Image: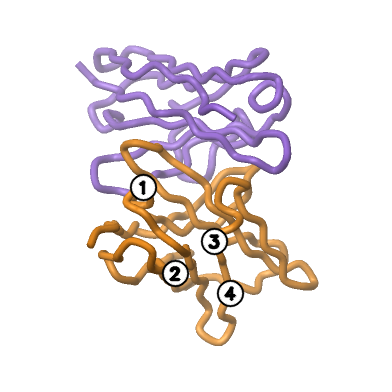
Amino acid sequence: QVQLQQSGPGLVKPSQTLSLTCAISGDSVSTNGAAWNWIRQSPSRGLEWLGRTYFNSKWYNDYAVSMKSRVTINPDTSKNQLSLQLNSVTPEDTAVYYCARGYLQKGFDPWGQGTLVIVSS
Amino acid sequence: QSALTQPPSASGSPGQSVTISCTGTSSDVGGYNSVSWYQQNPGKAPKLMIYEVSKRPSGVPDRFSGSKSGNTASLTVSGLQAEDEADYYCSSYADSMNLLFGAGTKLTVL
């Protein structure tokens, strides 16, 4: 059974970098063809896919167009986890952030427990 | 691209059937068989209920079914149970490697 455990700070100051990690158990971040995603949810913006990383003979990253300039998703094979970095945050980035395994075309399952990140000074 | 359009609320009595719609365009719902549905309970992560329009992941009751006609996808919950009360979100793959979500439908079991 695949389980995803998220960790990271719940409060980030404006203009700083939001950093979260997602530890994977029951699967490997390096599983060929398995994609690992970050998705966020806020009352104002709803659910929003941020991007993904996956290994298919080599590592790939894809990001939502609206986030591309600010987001970085990296795998950590030594710890079997993935990370999210979102630069230059504003209060608009306040949301619950989720990691999830899956594909844009086939849905996401399972999801991490979610991390509420508040951007405030 | 705009979010997919869902009704804000839906309701039904125990044992009844309820259908929730999800309307997009030919660039997303109508153009791909890549619609998913999620159930979300308060304070919890979304749970995948339907993928690729009508497929159910293992463990999802067959009371949940999905379909699509043109630019509109639908989730039907048959034999409503109290535990089905939750928020439901649709999503669809869209042009240029994009993913759209609906704003969600609150399902109330009367």
Chain letter matching colour purple:
B
Q: Mark 3 to mark 1: distance in Å?
A: 14 Å
Is A82 situated left or right of A64 in this image? left
Mark identifier at residue A75: 4
Do callouts 4 and 1 point to residues on the same chain? Answer: yes
Q: Amino acid at mark 1?
A: Glu
Q: Mark 3 to mark 2: distance in Å?
A: 15 Å
Hey, which residue is sitting farthest right in the picture? A57
Dot 2 or dot 4, earlier in sequence: 2
1 or 2: mark nearer the eye = 1
Q: Residue at x 41, y 44 (%)?
A: B47
Which residue is labeled 3 in the image? A71
Q: Mark 4 to mark 3: distance in Å?
A: 14 Å
Is B65 situated left or right of B46 in this image? right
Mark identifier at residue A22: 2
**Colour applied to chain A:** orange
Mark 2, Cα crowd under 10 Å, few <14 / some 14-19 / many 20+, is many
Q: Mark 1 to mark 2: distance in Å?
A: 22 Å
